[in-house]
């Protein structure tokens, strides 16, 4: 697609529920990144994929968070047993490839609210 | 812990003035540096990238990098009200071909 597409744009859920957030990167982009941004803060790195594999998942806060990219394109971020502290905007970005000079293009984000 | 530090502001400048935004980083081996602009409620968009010491100019924007001082800055000349946004500094470390580490951002307000 022309840009990075994220769905849903808004998600309200109750504490303890399971949530999936989807990211469709720019066509041809091999690298895909997930970030989380809380109000007044910069984006916080969660995980990035090179192709189908997670190249770095060191930012995932705990084992309730998991992400997949089974075919090397669309990615899903999965959050189990949601907590109120998980409320944030989840940003997805993609880049043509992984390299030092590589530029990330962000999607519009998925705003998650856990009640 | 690799860190990127920015003054959160708000930084307020009059229309037409130069806005100066600053960023320091802790990983001395960092190789790539980026400035993103984020309007309220929107996603970050890239303004500038810089990889070598010195200045890089693009229109009204100039990025400055000093690796010895671990310092990167963004100058906005002839500031416009439409420049009012949060500016995020992002750094990619040595050996990291992937993720960027972001600062908290500096909120800029340009007054007409």
Image (cartoon, coloured by chain):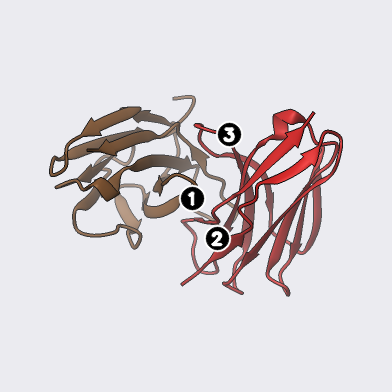
Expressed as whole percent of the image width and height from the top left, the position of residue B41 reads 49, 32
Letter of the brown chain:
A
Label at residue A26: none
Label 3–label 1 contact, CB within 8 A: no
Per the image, the residue denoted by label 3 is B39
Callout in the foreground (2, 1): 1
Expressed as whole percent of the image width and height from the top left, the position of residue B17 reads 86, 40
Query: Which quadrant holds the N terminus of chain A?
Result: top left
Indicate the quadrant where residue B40 lies. Answer: top right
Q: Earlier in the sequence, mark 2 or mark 3?
A: 3
- Few, some or many residues within 10 Å of mark 1 (<14, 14–19, 20+): some
Alpha carbon separation for disc pair 2 and 1: 18 Å
Q: Is residue B39 above or below residue A48?
A: above
The residue depicted at 54 percent of the width and 39 percent of the height is B44
Callout in the foreground (2, 3): 3
Residue B71 vs residue B83, the one in the foreground: B83
Letter of the red chain:
B
Alpha carbon separation for disc pair 3 and 1: 13 Å
Q: How many marks?
A: 3
Which SS class for mark 1? loop
The residue depicted at 49 percent of the width and 24 percent of the height is A2
Label 2–label 1 contact, CB within 8 A: no
Residue B37 vs residue B7, the one in the foreground: B7
Q: Are marks 3 and 1 on the same chain?
A: no
Per the image, the residue denoted by label 2 is B92
Query: Which quadrant holds the C terminus of chain A?
Result: top left
The residue depicted at 68 percent of the width and 70 percent of the height is B70
Label at residue A41: 1
């Amino acid at each position: 697609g022309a840009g990075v597409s994220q769905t849903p744009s808004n998600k309200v859920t109750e504490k303890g529920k399971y949530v999936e957030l989807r990211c469709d990167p720019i066509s041809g982009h091999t690298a895909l990144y997930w970030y989380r941004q809380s109000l007044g803060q910069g984006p916080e790195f969660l995980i990035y994929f090179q192709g189908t594999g997670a190249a770095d998942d060191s930012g995932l806060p705990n084992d309730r968070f998991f992400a997949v990219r089974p075919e090397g394109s669309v990615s899903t971020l999965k959050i189990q047993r949601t907590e109120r502290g998980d409320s944030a905007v989840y940003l997805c970005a993609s880049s043509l490839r992984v390299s030092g000079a590589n530029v990330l293009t962000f999607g519009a984000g998925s705003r998650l609210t856990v009640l | 812990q690799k860190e990127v530090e920015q003054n959160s502001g708000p930084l307020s400048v009059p229309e037409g003035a130069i806005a100066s935004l600053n960023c320091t980083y802790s990983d001395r081996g960092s190789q790539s540096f980026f400035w993103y602009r984020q309007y309220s409620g929107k996603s970050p968009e890239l303004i500038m990238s810089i990889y070598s010491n010195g200045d890089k100019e693009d229109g009204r924007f100039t990025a400055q990098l000093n690796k010895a001082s671990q310092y990167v800055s963004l100058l906005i000349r002839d500031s416009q009200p439409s420049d009012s946004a949060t500016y995020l500094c992002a750094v990619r470390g040595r050996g990291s071909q992937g993720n960027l580490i972001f600062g908290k951002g500096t909120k800029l307000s340009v007054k007409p």
